[in-house]
Amino acid sequence: CFRDHPETIKRRFISVFVVCCIAPIYLKKLVLPSYPEIFEEHTLWQWLGVKVNGLAIAILLPCLLTMILFMGPLMLQYLDGLVPLYLGHIRVVCCRLTPLQTRLYAAYVAACIATCDDGAAPISRGSSSRVSVSPLSAITQLKKLCNRTLAQTFINVHVMFFSVFQFSYTTIFGTYSAFLFLRTGHLAAPFVAHSFCNHMGFPAFNEVLSHRHPKRTFIALSYIVGLLLWIYLMWSATDPMWFANDVYTL
């Protein structure tokens, strides 16, 4: 089944529900007792990153930090007229929209329906397990590659390239999710970052070329500035002091 098929989504939620029930037991009975000197310092929920203290800032700052990383794609969407649709400042009345805006809005609604599970992907794909064992999410991409290759009589170069690309992309953002969790001590931090990344998707660099100068140069600079700012702010914006994180140290 395809990733957006109802049966596929249902199996995801069932499997992750089982894992979420097992994970706290495994953590409490097998992992934490191995470190008795720190086991009693915090509750099980604090080790899992579920706590109220510092929750609001743990949702806001990681989301803003991730938005900075996507400054280029956000600027591209703004110039394409999609941001007003997100913010709801345009009334959806066909007579007040240009033909291009009407098509964009229709495409936006269709995308929301077709990928409605993306925002909930941190749940349906296991946010806690992905944070703690992020490389495993990338290994699943290699498994998909093996399945696709075995189903064919020859190795499809395009399929192999796409799977290796997904492996690398998933590994990087899985590591970023783990970084946010360890720095903030909140499960909400990687959850919102993961949801935003899934909503944005991989940056469409080819769409930059569809714009003329000086817009093309401005968008390209937004990509570069966003990446540099993200690297510069990564540690200061996730200072454990902001999130009352006394559980994990990184």
Image: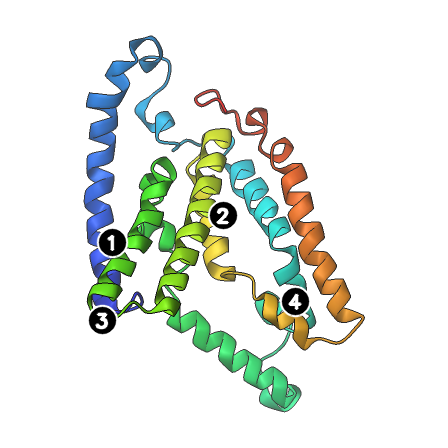
Q: Mark 2 or mark 4, which has the lower sequence index? A: 4
Q: Which residue is mark 3?
A: 152
Q: Position of residue 115 (x, y in %)?
A: 39, 67
Mark 4–mark 1 Cα distance, whole angstroms, equals 34 Å
The image quarter in which residue 105 lies: bottom right
Eyeballing the image, is 113 above or below 103?
Answer: above
For the question of whether residue 88 can be seen, the reply is no
How packed is label 4: few (under 14 Cα within 10 Å), some, or many (20 or more)? many
Q: Amino acid at mark 4?
A: Leu
Q: Which sits in the foreground, 42 or 171?
A: 171
Q: CA distance from mark 1 to mark 2?
A: 20 Å
Q: Sequence-wise, which precedes: disc 4 or disc 1?
A: 1
Q: Amino acid at mark 3?
A: Gln
**Residue 76, disc:** 4
Up-down relation of residue 189 to residue 213 (above or below): above
Disc ID at residue 193:
2
In space, the residues marked 1 and 3 are separated at their CA atoms by 30 Å
The residue under label 2 is which amino acid type?
Answer: Ala
Residue type, mark 1 in image = Phe
The nearer-to-camera label among 3 and 4 is: 3
Q: Is residue 125 above or below residue 160?
A: above
Q: Which residue is mark 1?
A: 13
Q: Horizontally, is 209 left or right of 39 in the view?
A: right
Give x and y (percent) for residue 4.
Answer: 31, 67
